[in-house]
Image (cartoon, rainbow, N blue to C red):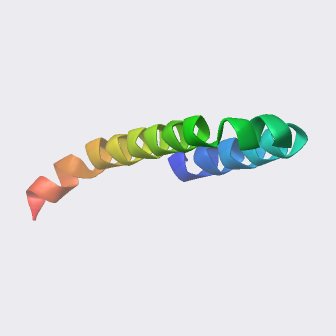
Amino acid sequence: MLHYLSYILHVMMQLFFSCSLKILLRQKLCLIKLLAHSYAATLLKTYKSFFPYLLLF
């Protein structure tokens, strides 16, 4: 479910940024920070949801 939502978000972001390419080029550093932050948040959520299972092993 989480993977599906992140995929939808990724596609929406690609469509949005292809429309605003000039802004993207100007704010590339800001975009990289945003993507890194959202990726880290997704990883953290996935880790938290699988953490109880990791404790079993």
Q: In which quarter of the image is residue 56?
A: bottom left
Residue drawn at point x = 27 percent, y = 42 percent: 48
- 41 vs 25, left or right, is left
- 46 vs 10, left or right, is left
Q: Quadrant of residue 24?
A: top right
Coordinates of residue 8 in the picture (x, y in percent):
70, 45
Coordinates of residue 6 in the picture (x, y in percent):
59, 46
- For this orientation, the residue located farthest to the front is 26
Coordinates of residue 57 in the picture (x, y in percent):
10, 65
Residue drawn at point x = 85 percent, y = 46 percent: 18
The front one of 6 and 55 is 6
Coordinates of residue 45 in the picture (x, y in percent):
36, 40
Q: Is 43 located above or below residue 30 in the figure?
A: below
- 12 vs 39, left or right, is right
Q: Quadrant of residue 40?
A: top left
Residue drawn at point x = 78 percent, y = 34 percent: 23
- For this orientation, the residue located farthest to the bottom is 57
- 18 vs 49, left or right, is right
Q: How many marks?
A: 0
Residue drawn at point x = 18 percent, y = 47 percent: 52
